[in-house]
Amino acid sequence: MTTATLVLVVDDEPAIIRALRPALTARGFRVDVARTGQEALDRAAVQPPDVVVLDLGLPDIDGLDVLRRLREWTDVPVVVLTAEGAEDRKVRALDDGADDYVTKPFSTPELLARLRVALRHRARSAGGDDGPAGAPPVLEVGDLRIDLPHHTAEVGGRRLELTPKEFGFLALLARHAGKVLTHRMILQQVWGPEYGTESEYLRVYASQLRKKLQEDPQRPRLVTEPGVGYRLIDRDTPV
Amino acid sequence: MARGRQTPGVFVELSPPLRRGLAALVGLALVGVLAGGLLPVRTDVSVATPALILVIPGIVAGLLGGRLAALVTATAAALVLDLVFIEPYGTLDAHLVDDVVALVSFLAVALVVAGLLALATERRQIAEQHADEVVALARAGDAQRALLRSVSHDLRTPLAAIRAVTTDLRDGSADYDEGTRRELLDVVNDEAERLDRLVANLLSLSRIEAGALAPELQAVDLDELLTDRVRRLSRLLEDVTVEIHGPDELPLVDADYTLVEQVVTNLLENAARHAPAGSVIRIDVAETGDDGAMEVAVSDQGPGVPAGDRDWVFEPFRSGSRGHTRGIGLAICKAIVEAHGGRITVGDGPGGRGARFAFTLPIHWARPAP
């Protein structure tokens, strides 16, 4: 990368800006700041950022509206900051195109990890070096290997016997490794567009997958984001 | 005001004695009208017909005016029955048994009706009282929830900044120079101070709620208090310039030093939160002139308080038309100032820009030396 990645931090709380600016700068990011929703939309138009950290509680415009208005013209990765207990707003933000979320009070390393995942994922889905289809034919997340053309999956060299829906579920999570996917997203992608509210299916399938993956409950690969969705993480990459 | 559905509204609006009197009059008038109407046919019908019909006035009077009106009307109806409809007409000379039976049944019907009405009214009043209590409880619950929401928001914001810094420093993956490291620790320090101010406000709030906010008055030098506050809040006021304006010789005020300190702190914190970086926060101290009080005004050059929000900006836990919560700080200012017999107001800043929060405190009149 020739120029440093530009992060637009949108938060009306000066203390959060004061905490994040040095942390991001020290990791090689350039930092732009907006204190209001309107300022965020203006800044993003004038100097398009590579990634946005967006607090959903802004003084002027609802953060969800800021996100929707950004999404009208840009697919810049957006990581939203939400207050604890606002599960419905997280889910709405993710369904409306946010790439991930971090709950306040958050840990800075966790936010940085989310930013990196969002940036990496966006670079991959933008085509880049991952082949013409956008997604590589073989997905690897740690020791999990998913061969999309052959519909096979193995973990540590051990072949997994998966039903088509289980395979679809796992492949979808692996394609978006590190990123949270909402119940609605998973249901619509794997079960079909007429699904969206049947999150109980996912509980059953997630628990079957965990058994087949022989998951360590202390360090699961398939992580439940309560009330929001699921995320597949590489256990060997610390978050 | 209680409104009955079972009785005509106009009667319920009247005072009870007037209502009873009017109901009795209506009952008596009805006795007259019915008796007059039945008079031409009294020889063609049996006594049972007028007897049954003359029960009606008692019921009506009982419904409208209660027990006393029912009693008067039913007695009159019983007399009229005997005089007009029981032979020999024009006398009260009937069989005693007939009279007693008529009187007792008239009274019984009228009184039972009046009693039922009284019971219904009482039930209704209890129900309304309960409804009021339910509403009051719901309001208290709302205030409680609003308090919790506001406090958790106010607590979480500094905590979020503190946690962001401490997790970052503990992670150790960033190579900070000494200046940046100090700056990050300043964030932790400033936000810890902010939490401390919040806790002070919460303690005051609990004293206010318990009705235990009694200022311990002493002669206070406002100039000294203001200068000290501005100095102590220098970190909070780092990005703005604070100017204190006032006459050289300020009269002392009668005030609780600690409480007034808290008012000034909250007003400065509020001003700092809304003032743009590099702007001036102005503190003006002046005698109000008319009522022997001093006025302290804190003006900022921020967005100001919209006219529509000014009525409730001092109410706890309301958020403004811009959706910004002002927390409990201003509500506490109001409670403290009013406990001193002063008043607090909000208006436009100098030149119509920003917000100007002003409060008054009584001037201390020195007792003559003994």
Image (tube, coloured by chain):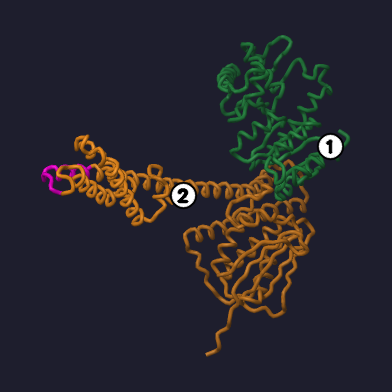
Question: In the rendered image of this protein, does residue A132 appear above or below residue B275?
Answer: above
Say what secondary structure mark 2 lies in: helix
Q: Is residue B224 left or right of residue A36?
A: left
Q: Is residue B95 magenta?
A: yes
Q: Say which of A85 and B118 sits in front.
A: B118
Q: CA distance from mark 1 to mark 2?
A: 52 Å
A63 sits left or right of A41 in the view: left
Sort mark 1 into few (<14), some (14-19) or many (20+) by Cα contacts within 10 Å.
some
The chain whose colour is orange is B
Q: Position of residue A32 (x, y in %)?
A: 80, 43
* Chain under disc 2: B
Q: Give how far across and how far down residue A78 sits, in percent.
A: 74, 34
Q: In the shown orientation, is residue A148 left or right of residue B114?
A: right
Magenta stretch prevailing secondary structure: helix
Rendering coords of residue B291 (x, y %): 61, 76
**Quarter that holds the C terminus of chain A:** top right
- Tell me which corner region of the image, top left, top right, bottom left or bottom right, holds residue B241: bottom right
Residue A53 sits above or below residue B340 on the image: above
The quarter in which the N terminus of chain A is drawn is top right
Q: Which residue is mark 2?
A: B136
Give the extent of the magenta segment.
Answer: B92-108
Pointers 1 and 2 in contact (C-beta within 8 Å): no
Residue B32 located within the stretch drawn in magenta: no
Can residue A77 be seen?
Answer: yes
Question: Chain A appears in which tint?
Answer: green
Q: Chain of mark 1?
A: A
Residue closest to the eye, B62 or A4: B62
